Image (tube, rainbow, N blue to C red):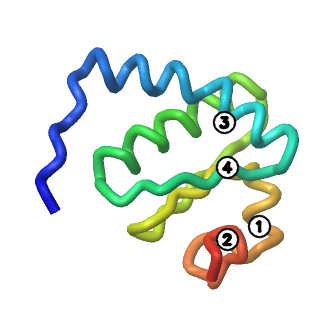
């Protein structure tokens, strides 16, 4: 698999800004957002998105990554499915 070209700072800024409304909408309608995030760069970017979504919605938001997917959900929902370190249905087991 060829190496990926890292995002420029401007691309990363734009991507984060564009994902915030999308993730916020998914959280308010379904309670979670799941995306393929298999690189540290993508995980970091979506963790920033999760922080911004939490601020935007005024609710605690958490994100979990398993090396393949990243799930963003409300903190209360994460507690219901076991939280960090458990076999969480949100991560697809």
Q: Residues within 10 Å of mark 4 (few under 14, many from 20)?
A: many
Mark 1 and 3 residues: CB-CB less than 8 Å, in contact? no
Can you give x and y, in whole percent of width and height, for residue 49 in the image?
53, 34
- Secondary structure at numbered mark 1: helix
User: Going from the N terminus, do you reach mark 3 or mark 2 first?
Assistant: 3
Question: Which residue is tagged 3?
Answer: 23
Q: Residues within 10 Å of mark 1 (few under 14, many from 20)?
A: few
- Secondary structure at numbered mark 4: strand
Question: Which residue is tagged 2?
Answer: 83
Mark 3 and 2 residues: CB-CB less than 8 Å, in contact? no
CA–CA distance between discs 2 and 1? 5 Å
Q: What numbered label is drawn on residue 79?
A: 1
Mark 2 and 1 residues: CB-CB less than 8 Å, in contact? yes
Please tell me which residue is depicted at 21% across the width and 24% down the height of the picture: 8
User: Going from the N terminus, do you reach mark 1 or mark 3 first?
Assistant: 3
Please tell me which residue is depicted at 16% across the width and 63% down the height of the picture: 1
Question: Which residue is tagged 4?
Answer: 33
Q: Residues within 10 Å of mark 2 (few under 14, many from 20)?
A: some
Residue closest to the far left: 2
Mark 4 and 3 residues: CB-CB less than 8 Å, in contact? yes
User: Going from the N terminus, do you reach mark 4 or mark 3 first?
Assistant: 3
CA–CA distance between discs 1 and 3? 20 Å
Q: Residues within 10 Å of mark 3 (few under 14, many from 20)?
A: many
CA–CA distance between discs 2 and 4? 15 Å
């Amino acid at each position: 698999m060829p190496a990926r070209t890292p995002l420029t700072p401007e691309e990363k800024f734009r991507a984060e800004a564009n994902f915030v409304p999308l993730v916020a909408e998914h959280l308010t309608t379904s309670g979670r957002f799941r995306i393929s995030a298999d690189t540290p760069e993508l995980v970091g970017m979506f963790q920033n998105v999760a922080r911004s979504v939490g601020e935007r919605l005024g609710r605690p938001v958490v994100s979990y990554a398993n090396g393949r997917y990243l799930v963003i959900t409300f903190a209360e929902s994460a507690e219901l499915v076991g939280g960090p370190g458990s076999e969480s249905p949100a991560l697809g087991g």
